[in-house]
Amino acid sequence: MGRKSKADERKLEILGHLYMVMKDAGLEGASIGNVAARMGINPSLIIHYFKSKEEMMVEMVDFLLTQYEATYLSELDRMEDAHERLEFALDAIFGVDWLDVTDPNVYYACYYMSYRNERVRARFAHMHAWFRQLIVAELVRLMPADGPEAALEKADRLAEFIIVLNEGMTYLYGVWPGREEYAKRAAHIREIVVKSLLEAGIPVRAGMVGPNLVP
């Protein structure tokens, strides 16, 4: 990748401050004025890079994706063993560390806008396509050799299943009281996913199988 320009770096800085404003004050507080006040600059400097609040919100979705990539992809890229890679991916998807990467208040504030703004919706569609392709790639590594097309189709169905469970689980974070309860329920959902992988003929390491599952 090429080196970021000064403008790109400045935009990322602004988005980082927007993230903190949204974390503290929600979507209603995500104004150019509030971001500028947090940064100690004139609002006109933000308008130089983002013409409106809408422009900031559209790019915020991409900003969230870069946080996932920076946190998880660099670690995943260091792994060569297919089982280790899959286990790491499932731990990331059904763990609690993501709560420190992207605050649910910010994520779902952006997600709410996807129902009203086609550009925001398109960015979320891109994020989920990226997420799905990542899961598919890890599953295919362990698929039985029953033909590339069949393996890809099976992996795609499983990836969709995993994403649906993950989205439902993260949505309910606001209902489940606290990280400990969330972690307990997420671990149970992870076991359901591992059982589905076993049923699909995907070999998993013994350490991935929970006490309630029989491989």
Image: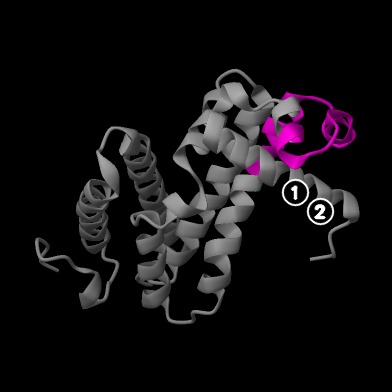
Label 2 Cα neighbours within 10 Å, binned few <14 / some 14-19 / many ≥20: few
57 or 168, which is in the foreground?
A: 57
Quadrant occupied by the N terminus: bottom right
Nearer to us in this view, 158 or 6: 6
Task: Specify whether residue 196 is in view.
Answer: yes
Q: Give how far across and how far down residue 66 sits, in percent.
A: 63, 53
Quarter the C terminus occupies:
bottom left
| Cβ atoms at labels 1 and 2 below 8 Å apart | yes
Picture coordinates of residue 98, whole percent (x, y): 44, 53
Residue at which label 1 appears: 13
- For image coordinates 41% across by 63% down, the residue present is 89
- On the picture, is 39 further left or further right than 105? right
**Residue shown at 67%/46% (left/top)?**
16
Looking at the image, which residue sits at the far top? Answer: 116
User: What's the amino acid at mark 1?
Assistant: Glu
Is the residue 126 above or below the residue 111 in the image? Answer: below
Q: Visible in this render: residue 143?
A: no
Mark 1–mark 2 Cα distance, whole angstroms, equals 6 Å
Identify which amino acid the numbered label 2 is placed on.
Glu
| Crowd rating for badge 1 (residues with CA inside 10 Å; few <14, some 14–19, many 20+) | few
| Label 2: element kind | helix
Q: Residue at x 67, y 38 (%)?
A: 18
Instruction: Determine if the magenta segment contains residue 55.
Output: yes
The span shown in magenta is 36-62
Residue 198: quarter of image: bottom left
Q: Which residue is mark 2?
A: 9
Residue at 86% of width from left, 37% of height from top?
49
Tell whether position 185 is magenta. no
